[in-house]
Amino acid sequence: MTQIKLTVLGVPKAQGRHKHFQRGKFSGTYDPSSEKKETFASILQGDAPTTPIATPIALELTFYMPRPKAHYGTGSKSEMLKDTAPEMQSSKPDIDNLVKFVQDSLNGIYYKDDALICTLVANKVYSDRPRTEIIINTL
């Protein structure tokens, strides 16, 4: 079994909804996240295997989201987390859109096709250091 661990620093990005357009009789769609996915993939390109994995894989993703200011105290306690501040992030962006963004970004670079993903674990938590952590295991 092969394991690849990756970390991308910065606020995790979500897959945007595809946009539809019409110009005269021509209609089409485009991916508004394509530039962000290319940037994300280029950050990880250096650690990619020489040939993409072509066997079933397990993908584990942890999205560390930035905490809102409301989670911190005020005045002299502005650096301290409130006792009521949650650990898990349960607001937008949706976890399935975060997952899809990563899957699409790594497709063809780390694995031959995202259809090879047989096991998926995803978590969305708060952190003072926003990032995306990725673990790919061959099965």
Image: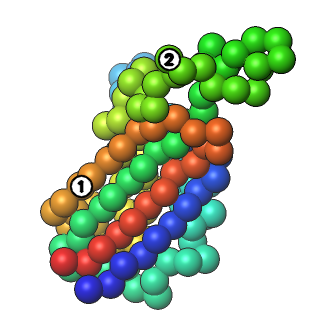
Give the residue displayed 26% in from the left and 86% down from the top: 1
Q: In the rendered image of this protein, does residue 109 appear above or below residue 55?
A: above
Q: Amino acid at mark 1?
A: Leu
Give the residue displayed 27% in from the left and 52% down from the top: 121
Q: Is residue 106 left or right of residue 65?
A: left
Residue annotated with mark 1: 120
Q: In the rendered image of this protein, does residue 28 appear above or below residue 129?
A: above
Q: Nearer the viewer, residue 129 or 9?
A: 129
Give the residue displayed 52% in from the left and 43% down from the top: 64
Q: Is residue 7 left or right of residue 56?
A: right
Q: In front of the other: label 1 or label 2?
A: 2
Residue annotated with mark 2: 84
Label 2 crowd bin: few (<14), some (14–19), many (20+), radius 10 Å:
few
- Mark 1–mark 2 Cα distance, whole angstroms, equals 30 Å
Q: Is residue 40 left or right of residue 49?
A: right
Q: In the rendered image of this protein, does residue 76 appear above or below residue 26?
A: above
Q: In the rendered image of this protein, does residue 68 appear above or below residue 9?
A: above
Q: Which comes before the other along the chain, label 1 or label 2?
A: 2
Q: Position of residue 133 (x, y in %)?
A: 48, 57
Q: Nearer the viewer, residue 76 or 61?
A: 76
Q: Position of residue 139 (x, y in %)?
A: 19, 77
Q: Position of residue 50 (x, y in %)?
A: 46, 87
Q: Amino acid at mark 2?
A: Thr
Q: Nearer the viewer, residue 42 or 119?
A: 119
